[in-house]
């Protein structure tokens, strides 16, 4: 907002230069933007934050700030209400249809107006504040807006409903209502605006005559021929005005203030001040002939208790109680002594002061934050406890990134279409009451649907896709919502065996994490997502930690994916428990280890896990490693080639002892699993 320096100086009595004043106000929570000087007058522009829009967007509000900062009280005469006299209100009937959107409406009919130029001093101050003078009536409404911060509007009385045919027994009905469907209005900018049912309007018996809180109508505007006016001083809902202003792309001084919420009691002061100026500069025999003040729910001042010790504790500075009291009084607050400090009466114009903390902020602001001395921390600084799960998830991310996987981050929602594509059912899903879209209707019970979208999208641009997601799935149990943390990975490339490639990455990941005794067991799919012939459960010892397998080709087809896709899912909480065990370090054996290869034919449907378990059981502690290094199929059979490492940590094994171990392994394989060992 643009402020006149001379105007501020007259109201506040400050003796500071414009530059000093700008620096002073900038240090106390206002943002200074620009200064221009023409002759003796200086125009100062400040950016007022929304939390002070209700009182600082006016010269008297800013003057009050200047006085408080300089340690003085504002000495302005209180505006005696000129509307307290008994005036005929029955002739001007005002009806507020929605009392939540219009908190107060004052209308006053003023006769014997002589439209002409406003006084030179008023024109000068309006120009210094960036407002172009028009005529005495309009200039007075603009002057009061800039002085007090209360928007006003003047209608040409004879143009409203009477169309010039005014009788001595007139009666006028005003309505503050929402616009009707199909209504439109020509505003002061001479543009016609189509209204909708959310726009608040001022209407006479026939049509809207103003867009409430934004701009008046052209058809009822003040002209040189105007002799009687209806002066409006009202208070409108901030949210409603902001939406209307945004919808119609109209920004005015009035809407700028109403959007930031102003005090309903200010409407009475604004009307009184405007009538006072009209009686002085609006004509020789100006008089009020009708008046109506509709104030459904009066706003009264309130009291906030302030503990002095608490204030000093929060500010970190010992400010004397007497200094606090003076600061609050200079801000225009009423202060009474209380056993712990003060009972502060807050005027309704300061709608931002509701709690003790609000008052403490005012004290600190006026005292000057730069005057608060630096103090060492009085509390012990302790290292916060580490979030083990978060650290573990970050470790998973780092390990998978090292294995060439890229992280994806999806929403925790999906839609009914995604559920159907994966062959799942909506039953059991937690539905969102107000979803942003139908694609986000349900909390996900699996990470796979969204990840398949990621795979399909990335395959349009890349030949190979290796992605992972650390996220949550959601289930309902006994009326409570359960969040289950998961790690899901997917791999798609030109390989004919993505399952084995992903299995290798999984084993490398688990080895990196220190998870031991990892084994895989064939499993039957619990849902149609998985390929029934390529699915395995993942175990660490006897603890199941997840699944690995290939996605069902029928599901892939629905997502437009033509390549084979493998994926695995791990429960992060179970995995974390396995990695909490302290690492055990063993010295490297000083005795040699012998490698022996073992080839065999097995049934095509045989489980490799059973073969490895049988070998380790047969060889006991002497078998330190079993590695599968070759597989090929032949006439319904599979040929496996394994490399065994055999050795003891206590002595060097003889050739005969090693041969004995191999014979025992071969014997148990042939007898228990019916394999054909190639000799």
Image: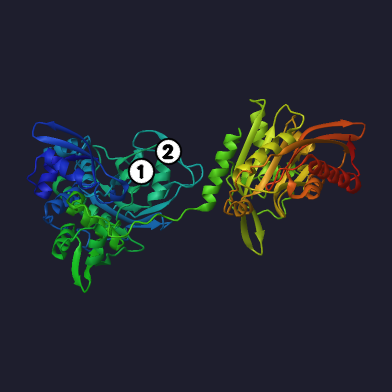
Q: Are marks 2 and 1 in contact (CB under 8 Å)?
A: yes
Q: Nearer the viewer, residue 607 or 103?
A: 607
Whole-number angstrom distance, CA of label 2 to CA of label 1: 10 Å
Q: Check the image and report above or below for 642 versus 342.
A: above
Element at label 2:
helix
Q: Nearer the viewer, residue 12 or 674?
A: 674
Farthest-out residue, bottom: 339
Residue 214: give its label.
1
Q: Position of residue 474 (x, y in %)?
A: 63, 53
Q: Residue drawn at (6%, 45%), measured in percent from left and top?
A: 15
Q: Residue drawn at (15%, 49%), measured in percent from left and top?
A: 66
Residue 248: give its label.
2
Q: Check the image and report above or below for 456 versus 238.
A: above
Residue 391: give its label.
none
**Tag 1 or tag 2, which sits nearer the N-term?**
1
Farthest-out residue, left: 15
Question: Would residue 524 be seen by someone viewing this image from the given angle?
Answer: no
Q: Nearer the viewer, residue 508 or 564?
A: 508
Q: Nearer the viewer, residue 104 or 330?
A: 330
Q: Is residue 313 left or right of residue 453?
A: left
Binning the other alpha carbons within 10 Å of mark 2 as few (below 14), some (14 to 19) or many (20 upward) gives: few
Q: Is residue 90 left or right of residue 537?
A: left
Element at label 1:
loop
Q: Position of residue 209 (x, y in %)?
A: 38, 44
Binning the other alpha carbons within 10 Å of mark 1 as few (below 14), some (14 to 19) or many (20 upward) gives: many
Give the position of the N terminus as an image quadrant.
Answer: top left
| Among the 4 quarters of the image, the one containing residue 635 | top right
């Amino acid at each position: 907002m643009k402020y006149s320096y001379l105007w501020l100086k007259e109201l506040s009595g400050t003796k500071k230069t414009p530059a000093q004043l700008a620096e002073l106000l900038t240090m106390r929570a206002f943002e200074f933007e620009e200064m221009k000087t023409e002759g003796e007058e200086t125009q100062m522009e400040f950016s007022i934050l929304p939390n002070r829009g209700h009182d600082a967007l006016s010269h008297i509000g800013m003057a009050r700030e200047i006085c408080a900062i300089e340690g003085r009280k504002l000495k302005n005469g209180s505006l005696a209400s000129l509307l307290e006299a008994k005036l005929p209100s029955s002739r001007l009937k005002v009806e507020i249809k929605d009392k939540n959107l219009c908190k107060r409406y004052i209308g006053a009919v003023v006769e014997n107006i002589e439209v002409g130029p406003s006084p030179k001093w008023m024109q000068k101050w309006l120009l210094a504040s960036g407002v172009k003078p028009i005529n005495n009536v309009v200039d007075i409404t603009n002057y009061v807006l800039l002085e007090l911060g209360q928007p006003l509007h003047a209608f040409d009385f004879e143009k409203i409903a009477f169309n010039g045919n005014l009788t001595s027994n007139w009666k006028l009905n005003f309505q503050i209502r929402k616009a009707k469907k199909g209504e439109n209005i020509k505003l002061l900018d001479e543009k016609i605006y189509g209204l909708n049912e959310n726009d608040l309007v001022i209407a006479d018996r026939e049509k809207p005559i103003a867009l409430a809180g934004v701009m008046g109508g052209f058809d009822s505007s003040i002209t040189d021929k105007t002799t009687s006016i209806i002066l409006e001083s009202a208070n409108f809902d901030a949210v409603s005005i902001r939406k209307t202003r945004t919808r119609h792309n109209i920004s005015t001084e009035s809407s700028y203030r109403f959007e930031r919420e102003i005090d309903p009691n200010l409407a009475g002061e604004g009307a009184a001040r405007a009538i006072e100026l009209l009686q002085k500069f609006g004509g020789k025999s100006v008089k009020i002939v009708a008046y109506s003040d509709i104030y459904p729910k009066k706003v009264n001042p309130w009291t906030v208790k302030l503990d002095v010790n608490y204030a000093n504790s929060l500010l970190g500075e010992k400010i004397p109680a007497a200094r606090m009291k003076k600061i609050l009084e200079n801000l225009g607050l009423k202060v009474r002594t209380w056993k712990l400090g003060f009972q502060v009466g807050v005027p309704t114009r300061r709608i931002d002061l509701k709690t003790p903390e609000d008052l403490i902020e005012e004290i600190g602001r006026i005292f000057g934050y730069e005057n608060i001395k630096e103090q060492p921390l009085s509390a012990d600084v302790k290292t916060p406890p580490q979030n083990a799960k978060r650290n573990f998830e970050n470790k998973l991310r780092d390990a998978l990134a090292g294995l060439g996987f890229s992280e994806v981050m999806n929403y925790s929602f999906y839609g009914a279409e995604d559920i159907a594509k994966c062959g799942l059912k909506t039953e059991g899903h937690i539905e969102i009451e107000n979803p942003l879209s139908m694609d986000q209707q349900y909390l996900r019970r699996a990470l796979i649907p969204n990840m398949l979208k990621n795979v399909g999208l990335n395959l349009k641009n890349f030949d190979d896709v290796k992605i992972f997601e650390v996220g949550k799935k959601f289930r309902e149990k006994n009326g409570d919502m359960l969040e289950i943390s998961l790690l899901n990975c997917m791999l798609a490339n030109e390989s004919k065996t993505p399952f084995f490639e992903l299995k290798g990455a999984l084993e490398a990941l688990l080895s990196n994490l220190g998870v031991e005794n990892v084994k895989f067991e064939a499993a039957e799919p619990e849902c149609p997502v998985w390929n029934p012939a390529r699915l395995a459960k993942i175990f660490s010892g006897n603890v199941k930690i997840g699944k690995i397998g290939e996605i069902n080709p029928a599901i892939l087809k629905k997502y437009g994916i033509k390549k084979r896709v493998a994926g695995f899912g791990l429960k992060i909480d179970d995995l974390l428990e396995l990695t909490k065990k302290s690492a055990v370090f063993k010295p490297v054996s000083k005795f040699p280890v012998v490698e022996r290869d073992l080839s065999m034919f097995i049934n095509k449907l045989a489980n490799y896990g059973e073969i490895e378990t049988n070998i380790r059981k047969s060889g006991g502690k002497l078998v330190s490693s079993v590695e599968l290094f070759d597989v090929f199929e032949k006439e319904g059979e599979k040929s496996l080639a394994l490399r065994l490492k055999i050795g003891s940590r206590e002595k060097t094994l003889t050739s005969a002892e090693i041969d004995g171990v191999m014979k025992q392994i071969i014997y148990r394989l042939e007898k228990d699993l019916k394999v054909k060992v190639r000799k």
